[in-house]
Image (spheres, rainbow, N blue to C red):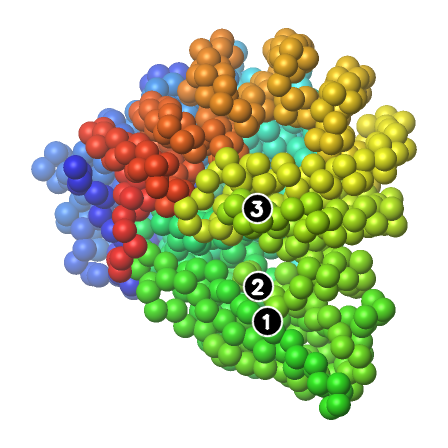
Amino acid sequence: MRHDAAPIIRLQDYRPSDFLIDRVDLDVRLHPTATRVTATLAIRPNPEGRSDAALVLDGDELNLKGVSLDGRDLPAAEFDATTQGLIIAQPPRQAFTLRIETEIDPTANTKLMGLYRSGGNYCTQCEADGFRRITYFLDRPDVLAVYTTRIEADLGEAPVLLGNGNPVEVGPVAGTDRHFAVWHDPHPKPAYLFALVGGRLGHVTRAYTTASGRAVKLSVYVEPGKEDRAGYALDALERSMRWDERVFGLEYDLDEFNVVAVSDFNMGAMENKGLNIFNDKYVLASPETATDADYANIEAIIAHEYFHNWTGNRITCRDWFQLCLKEGLTVFRDQEFSSDERSRAVHRIAEVKTLRARQFSEDAGPLAHPVRPRQYREINNFYTATVYEKGAEIVRMLKTLIGAADFRKGMDLYVARCDGTAATVEDFLAAFADVTGRDLSHFAQWYSQAGTPRVTVTGTYDAAAQTYRVDFTQATNPTPGETLKKPMAIPVRLGLVAPDGSALAARSDRVSRDGVFLLEAERDSIVFTDVSQKPTPSVFRDFSAPVKVALDLGNDDLLVLLRHDSDPFNRWQAAQSVSLRLLVSLAKGEPVGPAEIAPLASALTGFLERDALADPAFAALVLSQPGEAEIAQEIAADVDPDAVHAARRTVRRQIAEAASPLLRRLYDDLADTGPYRPDAASAGKRALRNIALDLLAVADPDAGQTLARAQALGATNMTDRLAALSTLATIPGQPREDALAAFGERYREEPLVLDKWFTLQAAIEEPGTLARVQGLLTHPAFSLGNPNRVRALIGSFAMLNQTQFNRADGAGYRFVAETILQVDALNPQLAARLLTAFSSWRLMAGGRRGHARSALVSIADSPRLSRDARDIVQRTLEESKPA
Ligand code: B3K
Ligand code: ZN
């Protein structure tokens, strides 16, 4: 059954490159099926490398046309070339010039790595290892070169030619209908940041002047005719640039900054130097086609890619094990930007919801790995929630521990020291250790130990002594390859709340002035003095560490926090905790009746009455119940997804029934009045109104259906239209089918909206959905070659639809497995990503577990599996054992 696996690459085996490449001159002659690439490389031995080493260049599916060294054509005896690499056993021992000519076929490139075509345009994706699909190269992030790129193309086919850096020259190619453009990037960079674009594109442009006075031309390129949907992205770019100047003192460093939207893209976007390439889903927005969530994502991803210019590009990674150095830090930076631009508390809750849904589940399953992995077989499988989201939490904890002022000083030192280099996590931490004089060695363990720590918290009040003691213990479950876990350095931001809801001004010498206690041992206690009344503890305020918390508090105390805590995150958390307890008990078949749910329902009703309109976005979050996947994670074994679904419905119904009149009033009061605006405050009102609609439909499906139909017909923006359709989708019957058909027809020419339509149908939690999804595979708009479409239909079914993917008869697993094999033949990265849906298979109850295992084995048995998919499927099937 086992097939040869790819070799394991280990952090401990890192060696500097034996050769360096200082300059790269590329001449790329674009052609749909036979693009010619001539690379002229200025190479020299690396003083830190081995002096007798061969020159070993990476390649992937390349067709070599010629190679010369210092102007001399190399005879076949002097090199060894395959489609996968080029080796010169006896290269010169001083600087030399290597000229390599390759031919590639961008039209046949369905992997979407290297040079490929999307909608007729040419574009590239090189991270992590796509540059080797363009030319033979030392394709590793610690080889930094200055690039000059000449791009040539048919003028009619590709009037727009874009490269990294600054434009140098454009002109016709005499005697032909072709033209060229030359771009020069003065900043040394690794090959993964290389990019070019050629095609027919429209654009919007804005002039920008940096804080120090550099003039920069900002442009966003999109499909011609969609320029009016690029404005929000351009605006977000300008705001990001201003923010980075203000908050981190970091300015842009080229004359142009270009963003290009393409429709076929494996991920969200890519931070190529001066030429960001984006999935058009994260650029294009109009009120008619994009939801509030789309606008927020565009803002966040535009910012993220822009922020990489410093954290990623100017300071890059020494090797791919250090991926979190750029990704965790840059996610932290984009989160801070969004928090400043929107509502900090609301954004924090959204971040934590994502972290719990994606990262905690990863940490609890077969794909768990440290934020800095120690080994990999396929690096593209390590662009994970752990590297990104937990990586960002580590940076946030660092800031919590040392304070905002020292954090900024540490960032300044990191940038000053490491600019222009390929750095490591150690370099990053050293900057903060040096500015604070602190020993960060225990803290550094967050990068090396996988798993989510569980912290139990118990409070004891001593009325006579007027003290309140808080006892902490911590433990982390084993993860693959790591059985014994050490205690972590966990910042606990906490406070005490008096019975009347006021903050208690109690003191403890273990708690910093900012209210942070650092838990470092397996168990520890702190004692607050001068505590005049029995308080309720509010711990892990603002989610101060990525841990699971077991709090020794009754539901009544938690509901006091919902009402009174000064920390908005913990207000939200309190309601979630109560709800999760009820949901887990119900799903396990424990006796939970209306009397047990009533306190939550009435607390939420009271909350709505008092606070809903003060911050509607926050209220919408407080009203939303934990998702089915989160409940399943909490149950942790022998999960019955149908019982989870039913439990959630029961709790939501009781809340909805209790709050019904109020919800109806909110629904009417928040009715849209003015023209659509995507700002956070307007979006918050729509969010609250739409969750009210959804709950009203739970309490009374007939009334909800009527409201939702009216909203779907009358909506003046995509947010409200899609929300209405989502509510309708939960109510079986002809009105739903009619609404779905009308929506599909209305947006038949709008790919990004059709993706929403596919997603919505794939997520319907009813037994008929599998057949519906299978039917949609043959819909004329469906294509296995377009990643957005595949994620919308197959990804949504596997990742959002807990009951139907995990069907008791195994048909959901079988369908997804078969489809993944088809996708894998075209696009391994996409297939590998879809496969991660199976990583919760061991949580399921027996029968389902058996079906999931068979589906996984059927994939593992496939003889032509890609390295990407094989890596995931094998790790998913492996019994947890030391690696
Ligand atoms: N750095 C890219 C991700 C590349 C993924 C390669 N498989 C986007 C980002 O994180 O900004
Ligand atoms: Zn990134």
Identify whether 39 is placed above or below 557. Answer: above
Image x and y of residue 375, in percent: 31, 55
Q: Would residue 548 be found to the left or right of residue 829 on screen? A: right
Q: Quadrant of the N terminus?
A: top left
State the residue in front, 479 or 832.
479
Q: Which residue is mark 3?
A: 586
Earlier residue among tags 1 and 2: 1
Q: Residue, x 42% and y 50% (percent of image)?
A: 637
Residue linked to disc 2: 549
Residue 468 falls left or right of residue 851: right
> Distance between the Cα atoms at labels 1 and 3?
25 Å
Q: Amino acid at mark 1?
A: Val
Q: Amino acid at mark 3?
A: Leu
Q: Residue at x 74, y 27 (%)?
A: 700
Mark 1 and mark 2 in contact? Answer it, CB < 8 Å: yes
Q: Secondary structure at mark 3?
A: helix
Kindly identify the amino acid type of the residue bearing the numbered disc 2: Val
Residue 541 occupies quadrant = bottom right
In space, the residues marked 1 and 2 are separated at their CA atoms by 7 Å
Per the image, the residue denoted by label 1 is 457
